[in-house]
Image (cartoon, grey):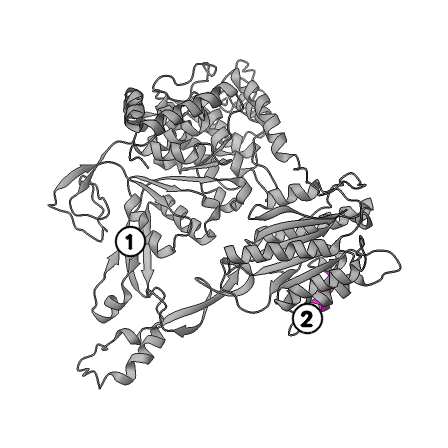
Amino acid sequence: MSDVRYPFTAVVGMTDLRLGLLLNAVSPAVGGVLVRGEKGTAKSTMVRALAGLLPSIAAVDGCRFACDPAAPDPQCPDGPHACAGSHERPSQLVELPVGVAEDRIVGSLDLERALAEGVKAYEPGLLAKAHRGVLYIDEVNLLQDHVVDLLLDAAAMGRSYVEREGVSVRHAARFLLVGTMNPEEGELRPQLLDRFGLTVEIAATRDPAERAEVVRRRLAYDADPAAFAARFADDERALAERITAARELLPKVELTDVALRQITAVCAAFEVDGLRADIVMARTAVALAAWDGRTEVLEEDVRKAAQLALPHRRRRNPFDAPGLDEELLDRTLEEHAQPEPESEPEGSPEGGSPEPDGDGDGPDGDGPGPDDDDGPGPDGGGAPEPERGPEAPEAAASDAPDLAEQQQPVPAQHPAPARESAPVAAGDPYRTRLFAVRGTGHGAQGRRSPAETDSGYTVRARRPQGALSRLHLTATLQAAAPHQVARGRSGAALVLRKDDFREQVRKGRESNLVLFVVDASGSMAARQRMTAVKGAVLSLLMDAYQRRDKIGMITFRGAGAELALPPTSSVEVGAARLESLPTGGRTPLAAGLLRAHEVLRIERLRDPARRPLVVVVTDGRATGGRDALAQSRRAAGLFAAQGVASVVLDCESGPVRLGLARTLAGHLGGTAVTLDELRAEGVASLVRESRENRPTTVRKAA
């Protein structure tokens, strides 16, 4: 791989992404940018190229935290820096790997030396390395939630804290935060989405000419990276100079009362939670004005700031697609485009001012009206030009089909043609009971099954397994106490040896792989019944999202079974596949169970620590061959033999019931629940059902 970065100005298209990155380069206080898009769309390429445009920085000699010699951090662990020399160096780009541990991010303390020698030995982490540079998180949606929280806290406060058993280290950590993600692999929680300042949705162009130019440039870069970079050197230099000029102009930009009222009115109109959106929009609008070389925020800046800062804050549940109602945005901006009139005595004949807002609660302002709100956007230097003025309606119209495409269900593929009914809509989701895998696991942190995790409550102590990170102080002192005389202790301090140290074992909850095996045969085709079944599965999908699980879906009907959704963290895709699921044909139950068994075998090789939970959605009937019912029960026995936790969602209805689903649950070694019993507010006695004899426990949702 070449050391020459792909030039930022050589990327074709990606106007919004380009602008979002540049605005954060001008004003890191905007809060970073989250880039959402399909794979292969140059997300990582543009982020890495951005670092080459940032101005070089002056750093104190010998400081591992890149302190600014003009204003060194008074709490720097390597300080004080009163008379230290300095040097110039490029801004750093620090990339965060997906499987990174918390200690690698914030740094680590050598607890053994701290206790035995009284030395505060601190090894800086990636946050220290990223200070005054760029922190890039690829696939941020695949990181553990507590790790993302930690990163966003540091980005918001500009400081990192390390606390270990009473030993505390803190240092400056101000950086430009950029995260990328593919929504198909899972969403971030709305609480974490809100912490990113801006979000940009990108997709590959469908224009053959643009695609050809992308390929042409990439091949040229691969053939001779240095020569290719030289072609764009002048554009890169001009863009870097424009970033520097915008940074210098930023403190001089005025946010008028009119612009501020438009910002707050837009956030209120879109019912955005909290006030972070208002603050981010204000900072973004100011950065847009500085980028354009202006000292006053205009309506066009507010409009573009809303398009970048609000879509990801509009989600109310995991099945909502990010988006923005452009008509509502334009209407709100127009209604608040003029200064509010000063309060007049009742019945005043004053006539030249515009009508006041209906509630009259907004702040009054004397800022100038945006007479030039249809004026041109930024130009030159390869910079992006936001869609403004008369172009906005066209943009809204062009965006609408894309959003509609995102919300359309993905058609499922079936192994053989069969008589089928048209897909029916799912019922409304509801809160379900908690199904947990019995025993204690060691999987990724989540909210479903008991497990030994990095967080939680301490249950015992043990000898360290690897580097000591979570010291169990009491157990360490108890292990060292009997040996103090033999070790020649003479003062107040304990004499410790490496074998004395003990670490905490904490118990929390893990996430699991929830694999749905859904009967889509003719026996399930009654419209009202399938609506209820889909509503139940949708509710379980929502529960899996909230508990940080991976999900997969197998459907069986007609001549066989298919993997409709490979294991993923994206419940949105699962919901779309469920919505488009047709029904009809025979009931190859055994084929569905055998396909599930094979999927679990493969997933066990990929992620052996993640324990599975199989949810079979069926009425228990099996057709389609000789001894179909016996074959399905033999297939179920494979799960019982391996101790796989399972739940059968009994979909049988009517006055006469055969009880086949409960019999199937017995062969699986699992639990059977009806659609009515699935609800969290259902029969309380189900909570206490045979926990000791079942690999699955059912209890009221937390």
**What segment is highlighted magenta in the picture?**
681-687
- Where residue 475 appears, as percent x and y from the top left, is 36, 76
The answer for how far apart the CA atoms under marks 2 and 1 are is 48 Å
The kind of secondary structure element at disc 1 is strand
Left or right: residue 421 versus residue 390 is right
Look at mark 2 in the image and give the residue it sits on. 688
Residue placed furthest toward the front: 626
In the rendered view, would you say 357 is above or below 587? Answer: above
Q: What residue do we see at 73% from left, 61% from top?
A: 682
For the residue pair 304 and 255, the one nearer the viewer reads as 304
682 magenta-colored = yes
Look at mark 1 in the image and give the residue it sits on. 170
Which amino acid type is shown beneath numbered disc 1?
Answer: Arg
The kind of secondary structure element at disc 2 is helix
Q: Is residue 100 visible?
A: yes
Q: What residue do we see at 35% from left, 43% from top?
A: 95
